[in-house]
Image (tube, rainbow, N blue to C red):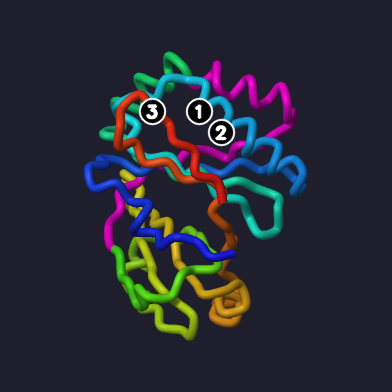
Amino acid sequence: MTMTHFMDLVHPAAGTALISEWLTGTPERSHAAADAMIDQWAAAETPSALLAQHLFISTAGTSLLFYAQWTSDEDHLAWARARRLEVVSRVDTLVPGIERPGLNRTRLHRSVVHDAKRRPGVFAVTTMTADDAENTVMAAPGLLGEHIHLTTDGERAIVVTEWTDAAAQEAATTDGLDVKQYTLHHAFLNDRPGSLPLRRR
């Protein structure tokens, strides 16, 4: 499936990028949870501080990845205290037993685009130390771009890479590195406060 470039998903006014994973277990549960979450977003009023919300499904079908961009962490926390439980609990009613390892508050630190012409077939996500991310120079056939996010404590980096296809990414993976592959399922850029255009892949 042809997808958009990662930089097309980045909102220029974002003050924070929130990255979180939901472990669902099976492709059926992943799609059910993803569609239920999108329905919840569509039914609710979109906070003006929510600038972008993107949802990815792992190629293995066992997890979801959320990439949300807000004006600030404070704005997100204010919304989360008031509304998050209501939104998530409805999804949990439909798809019980979802595991959520935690939310990573990050900033997009650096992006390198190697090939802006070809569209990615898969996104790969891995976590490493900030030092390793800074010192690792990636160059591999099929690598289209890499985007380093640093956590707010500056200790860890979440690296999102774009690849032509899954095989190219797998051929370049270093032994011992935990990498998950995802495809884009839903993309939303809040260009008009209060609206939520749905763009499903």
Nearer the observer, 100 or 52: 52
- Sequence-first disc among 3 and 2: 2
Distance in Å between CA atoms under marks 2 and 1: 5 Å
Say which residue appears at 38% left-offset and 28% top-offset.
195
Mark 2, residue position: 38
Task: Tell me if residue 36 comes above or below residue 141 in the rendering.
Answer: above
Q: Nearer the viewer, mark 3 or mark 2?
A: 3
Hey, which quadrant is residue 19 in on the image?
A: top left
Task: Tell me if residue 30 comes above or below residue 137 in the rendering.
Answer: above
Distance in Å between CA atoms under marks 3 and 2: 13 Å
Mark 1, residue position: 41
Q: What residue type is labelled 2?
A: Ile
Say which residue appears at 73% left-offset and 30% top-offset.
95
Q: What is the number of the mark on residue 195?
A: 3
Tag 1 secondary structure: helix
Hey, which quadrant is residue 53 in on the image?
A: top left
Question: Contact, CB < 8 Å: mark 2 with mark 1?
Answer: yes
Q: Nearer the viewer, mark 3 or mark 1?
A: 3
Say which residue appears at 41% left-offset and 83% top-offset.
139
Question: Contact, CB < 8 Å: mark 3 with mark 2?
Answer: no
Residue 33 picture location, percent across and down: 66, 36
Q: Which amino acid does label 1 sit on?
A: Trp
Q: Which amino acid does label 3 sit on?
A: Ser
Nearer the observer, 124 or 28: 28
Q: What stretch is highlighted in magenta?
A: 84-110
Q: Quick one: which residue is furthest to the bottom in this view?
A: 141
Residue 87 picture location, percent across and down: 55, 21
Nearer the observer, 11 or 43: 43
Judge the density around disc 2: few (<14), some (14-19), many (≥20) Cα neighbours within 10 Å. Answer: many
Residue 120 picture location, percent across and down: 49, 68
Say which residue appears at 39% left-offset and 54% top-offset.
156
Residue 65 is left or right of residue 74, and the answer is: right
